[in-house]
Image: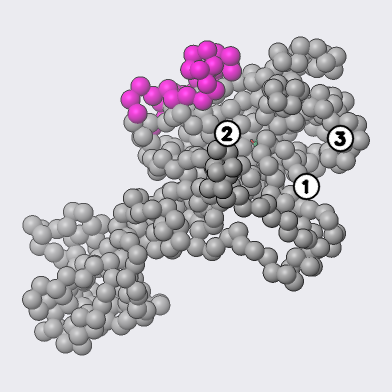
Amino acid sequence: MTDRTLNIDTVSKAGQEVTVAGWIANRRDHGKLIFLDLRDHTGLLQVVVNPKVSADAHSTAEKLRSEFVVVIKGKVNDRPANMVKAELSTGTVELEATEINILSEAQTPPFELDETKDVNEETRLKYRYLDLRSPRMQNNLRIKHKTTSLVREYLDKKGFIEIETPLLTKTSPEGARDFLVPSRYNPGKFYALPQSPQQYKQLLMLAGFDRYYQMARCLRDEDTRRDRVLEHTQIDMEMSFVTEEEVRAIVEGMMIYVVESLGKKVLQKPFPVYTHEQAVQEFGADKFDLRTEKNPEVFAFAWVVDFPLFDYDQEEKKYTFAHNPFSAPKAEDVDKLLKGEDLGDLRAQQYDLVCNGLELGSGGVRISDPQVQRKVFEIMGLSPEQTEERFGHLIKAYEYGAPPHAGIAPGLDRLVMLLTNEEDIREVIAFPTTASGQTAVMDAPSPATEQQLKELHLKIDKPEIRNPKSETKSNT
Ligand code: ASP
């Protein structure tokens, strides 16, 4: 539509003829006059339909209902100063319609679209495309876009390049279950969807790219929470020839740039740094909120450093990685690690970024010595054969000249949650899954056809659905 004017641009076009397009948000009949609120992505515009101006437009307007899509021609008029609608960004003007064309009719939406927060989650996600028409959701996704643009701008200036890494890959442990994808060409074999691009970004450092980033999708089959979903996006970063402090300085600059560009305040600069031990002593946890008043406009960032290298798994009775198996021990702890001494006391060159009570991201200096890497896998209980089978590719790569490197991956969705003052991560994701893992709008997961299963050489062996009632009976 070459002659289309956006609602917001009518403000500077008083006296002119324009064509606007969008959705009917509201229709009010006042005697002969009909008032419409027309919504486009820039806001609402009041349209007046007067039968004396156009009898045709008026009879079309009588048929309009909420969410009809229309094109309206008319003249922009200034509203008298005492009638300016302060609540509308276009409140100083209104459009006097001369022609209305209906492009698409609409059924009555299942819920009101001006504020959808209280609508039940299942309904909201089933009709997510309607939910997303609400001003709050529009704003949330626009702030998310703005955030990624600012991040890209900042990292580009700092010499980072964005590189994509595969989604069909091999497991890379980040402490969650993998999502698996069966391979048609390789019966009985599976790809894993990445829990993070961790190994690829390390390989990119070995490949000589020096500074990498990616808005990376991470898929983790784990229980969802208000700040955790099955797939989330990380600002995944890795740098060569740097220390822990240099990585933190870059991330700090990036966070300040993003937050301040969006008009918010950073509480303390530089960000305060706590050792893991101090954080646990002072706050009883490794994430905390340093704000005295819970003002959402203020961002209280802090670093937590010196995490333990290993956690002891009480059930399995063995040590496992605390962050991921690629975190380097502190230089002074390497000897002990190689000797297998005091494993519970070893510290890692690992750091977390926290903000307003959320963990925004974790990162670390990576192991770049294959001997140390093998030892970590051994401590985790992998036999040399298992290590070879699962991580041989990575260890081998480190035998061809490996620069020291380190990185981090701040969670984009969590950052945007804070920037939009939302309590639930689903409020900043266009099409999230429900708490029980159902996708928005498209009803997945759903069964595969017989043909698909056959091609993939798969047979389904579903668990018996237990009947809770009969179980109670047999117990009594
Ligand atoms: N891959 C890590 C994570 O997903 C981040 C990192 O260490 O860079 O938490």
- Residue 354, given in percent of the width and then of the height, sits at 51, 28
- Residue 8, given in percent of the width and then of the height, sits at 30, 62
* Residue visible at 69% across and 55% down in the picture: 462
* Residue visible at 33% across and 61% down in the picture: 111
Q: Is residue 378 left or right of residue 223?
A: right
Q: Which residue is mark 1?
A: 170
For ligand 1, give the image quadrant.
top right
Q: Give the amino acid at mark 1.
A: Lys
Q: Nearer the viewer, residue 317 or 139?
A: 317
Q: Which residue is mark 2?
A: 361
Q: How is the protein colored in the picture?
A: one colour
Q: Give the amino acid at mark 3.
A: Thr
Disc 1 versus disc 2: nearer the observer? 1
The residue range painted magenta reads: 265-294
SS label for mark 1: loop
If you read the primary sequence from the N terminus, does the residue marked by circle 3 or circle 1 appear first? 1
Q: Nearer the viewer, residue 461 or 354?
A: 461
* Residue visible at 68% across and 36% down in the picture: 174
Viewport quadrant of the N terminus: bottom left
State which quadrant residue 98 falls in. bottom left
Q: Give the amino acid at mark 2.
A: Gly
Q: Classify mark 2: residues with Cα within 10 Å, few (<14), some (14-19) or many (20+).
A: many
